[in-house]
Amino acid sequence: MQLTRAQLEAFDRDGFLVFPELLAQEEIDILLSETERVSRVEADGIFREGDDQQAKSLFRLHEPDGATASPAFRQLARSPRCLGLAQQVLADDALYLHHSKVNMKAAIQGSTWPWHQDFMSWKLDGIERPNMVTVLVMLHEATPINGCLYFIPGSHKLNRLDPYYDTSTAYRLWAADTKTMRKAMALYPEPVSVTGAAGTVAVFHCNLLHASGHNLSPVDRWHAFMCFNTVANHPQPVEDPRPDYVRSTNWNKLVLGDNSQISNAAAG
Ligand SMILES: O=C(O)CCC(=O)C(=O)O
C-alpha cells in the first residue's frame, strides 16, 4: 500500500496513522492461534501477571529460531502492511526490528501501561536518534473498556522527555511522571482513543506519548507490536544491555514480503 502525501503529512503532524481492518479475519485467526500457542511456552521474553500468571507480553516472535518463534508473526513483520508502512513513514528502506511482541491484556485482569514515549527506553538501549516507529496490529477489537491505547496527537514534537522507571506492573519500563504529563497535556489536544475492529493497524512515532488502561471488560484485548529502527541507527554499546528479545542485535535489513505470506506461513 502506498501512502498519500496527505497521510505522510498527517503522520508528521500527529505522530500516528490508523488504518481500519487492514488484515483479514482469516489472517487474524492465524495470529490469534499462534499467540495462544506461544503463550504456553516457558521462556525468557514471556511476562506473566495476576494470581493465575496469565501471559501479559510475549517477545521475539519474528525471528526464525528460539522458543517464541512464530512463522506467521515473522511474515506479518515483513508484510507491506507492517514493514512497508514503516519504510514509508521513516523514508528509509533499510529497517530491522528492535523487537516484536504481543501484549495480551486479559479480560478483567489485564493491567495498565503508564504514559510513556517508547524512545524513553530505546535511547537507554544505546540508540541515538528517534528514527523509529511501531506498527500496532489489533488482534481483537480494541475499545475504551477493554484497555485500548490512547495517543496524544502531536506530542512526538516534544522530543524525548525525562523519564522515571515504572515498576508498577509485571513489565517494567521508563515512563512519564505526573508533573511531566500535566505539562504535556496542557500543550496538546485531548488524548484520542485508538479503537477499532480486529485487523486494524496503527503506526506511531517513538516519541509519541501513549498509554492504556486496565481491561475492565469480560473480553481479552491482544495487540501485536512491531518496533522498527533504521539499520543506520542501530544501538551503540551500552553497559549492561537489555536482553536480545527486547533490544535485538540482529540489524540485518528486512526484506519486504507480500501480503499472502501470513496465510502461507500457517499452511506451511
Ligand atoms: O499494550 C498496550 O496496551 C500498551 C503497550 C505499549 O504502550 C508499549 O508496548 O509501549
Image: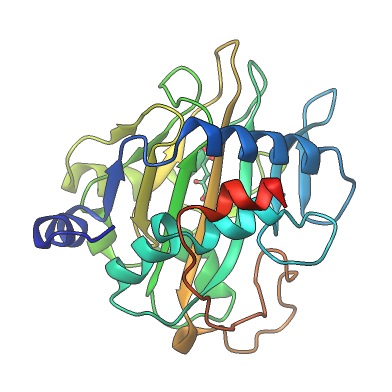
Outermost residue, right side:
42
Q: Nearer the viewer, residue 120 or 41?
A: 41
Compared across the picture, whether 8 is left or right of 260 comes to: left
Q: Tell me: 74 left or right of 123.
A: right
**Looking at the picture, how far across and down is residue 150, in whole percent?**
36, 36
Q: Residue at x 58, y 89 (%)?
A: 236
Vertical comparison of 218 with 46: above or below: above
Q: How many marks?
A: 0
Whether 171 is drawn above or below 49: the answer is: below
Q: Please determine whether, in this image, residue 115 is positioned above or below residue 130.
A: above
Query: Hey, which residue is sitting farthest top in the picture?
Result: 218
Where does the image place residue 136, in percent across and percent down from the top left?
45, 47
Give residue 81's quadrant in the image: bottom left
- Residue 157 in percent (x, y) is at 23, 63
Q: Which residue is depicted at the point 54% across and 60% down?
A: 77
- From the viewer's side, name the closer residue of 72 and 18: 72
Quadrant, the N terminus:
bottom left
